[in-house]
Amino acid sequence: MVTFDGRAPGTPAGRWSADPRLGALPALALRRTGRTVVVAAHPDDETLGAGGILAELADAGHPADVVIVSDGAASHPGSPTLDPDALATRRWAEVVEAVHLLSPDSAITMLGHADGGLREARDAIEDDLRGLLSDGAQVDQLVAPWRGDGHRDHRIVGEICAALADELGCTLLEYPLWLWHWATPDDARVPWDRMRVVELSDRSVVRKQRAVAAHVTQVTALSSDPRDAPTLHPAFLRTFDRDVEVVVAAGEARDTLPGEFFDATYDRHEDPWGYTDRWYEERKRALTLAALPAARYGRVLEIGCGIGVLTQQLAGRADHLLAVDVSAEAVARARTRVAGLPHVRVEVADVADAVPAGPFDLVVLSEVGYYFSRPTLERVLADLRATLAPGGTLLACHWRHPVEAYPLGGDEVHRVLRRTLDLSLLAEHREADLLLDVYGDDPRSVAERTGLA
């Protein structure tokens, strides 16, 4: 195991944030439905390592269950202020407050095993966790301490959870915590190849900061006695002030989906996403067209046109429309659909390789962003921004439910949009199934543009 002093500042947070590998980590499409259980070795691990995940799941309407394995009574050995029993009571109250800030409806269970003695209680802990995980609805996602975190209690709980995830057939996500303290970015033990990031909303970031502060016994001194010093150094805490949660996931990183994926899909189905017969799709197209701030656009680029159903409707709002898709079969069907529209051109193109030359007055990115890896999406967005004409508009619309095959989720795509584009957010529409955002180089509202305001 790694030897380190948890009260010391550890590796500076800036050293991690400056490493380009951290910023280039693939985004994880967090499962936001079903049952998730977050397991912590100690009170406060759930907040430091997975607080943002708890907040995101709460906002998605599927709050996670929280299980704390140890009583936390060994954090201040020899404290003249609190004996171990009183400290355990305080730490339980802090967990309740912190989790309530993150996810008010989460059920919290504290197993009460001896802090620092989890190896000796391994069998009992496994029995306790198996019972909890087997009780009630099937567990779809288990979030637990990373087994390589360098703390013995974390390793034990992580190993138990990994075995139970395999036994139950659920997804396992492991969160590093002390790794950020004792390791450096170039340490060979940092699992860069398996690390992923869960994008957090601004709301989740703020709630996590407040939840960390709720663990008062760990972040402030109990008294002036050195034995009552905070167990978490302020410099170390800055490591967790991020807009992502970093997790270690099983399996290989999922890169941008290739054109062959879509060709194979169209080979199997004439209309694989039900564009022509689903009310959901019809309604979404109506929302898309209604959200556009201008009645008509000069040059329009539609990315991922599929079989051309939205293309056909966009044509009525454009002087010139270029629709592209990576699938040759989809493009052939789209061309047939718009054959009578001479101002519409449909081409096979992969914007991950090159964005068509602009300038464009309108760019439509509908149900496409989550097919890219995060670095590719950021690059594509930068290229699209460069092709946008002065005063131009970019509309993005994406499905919110998780799809295992996709590198990103819809929520992650729209967070990348908000953090990447130097455009004004003109309109936003959020519902359980989809997100629709409209960005513009012209910040004026429709009423202001048309002289009503």
Image (cartoon, helix red, strand yellow):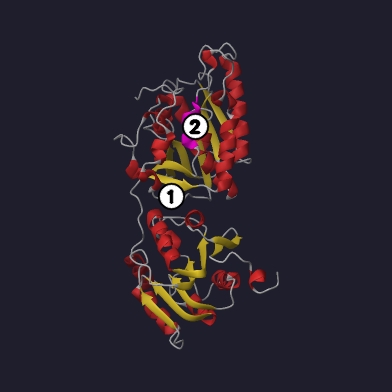
Say above or below: 249 vs 439: above
Q: Which residue is mark 1?
A: 28
Q: Position of residue 202 (x, y in %)?
A: 56, 47
Circle 1 Cα neighbour tier, 10 Å, few/some/many (<14 / 14–19 / ≥20): many
Say above or below: 213 vs 192: above
Say above or below: 143 vs 332: above
Of 295 and 346, which appears nearest the observer? 295
Q: Residue at x 43, y 77 (%)?
A: 322
Q: Which residues are magenta?
A: 232-240
- Element under disc 1: loop
Residue 13, quarter of the rendered image = top left
Q: Position of residue 137 (x, y in %)?
A: 54, 44
Magenta-span inclusion, residue 380 = no
Circle 2 Cα neighbour tier, 10 Å, few/some/many (<14 / 14–19 / ≥20): some
Say above or below: 61 vs 292: above
Q: Residue at x 46, y 22 (%)?
A: 7
User: Nearer the observer, disc 1 or disc 2?
Assistant: 2
Q: Position of residue 130 (x, y in %)?
A: 48, 34
Q: Amino acid at mark 1?
A: Leu
Quadrant (top left/top right/bottom left/bottom right) for the N terminus: top left
Q: How many marks?
A: 2
N-term mark: 1 or 2: 1
Q: Amino acid at mark 2?
A: Leu
Q: Main secondary structure of the magenta part?
A: helix
Q: Is residue 441 visible?
A: yes
Disc assigned to residue 278: none
Residue 213, quarter of the rendered image = top right
Quadrant (top left/top right/bottom left/bottom right) for the C terminus: bottom right
Q: Which residue is mark 2?
A: 237
Magenta-span inclusion, residue 239 = yes
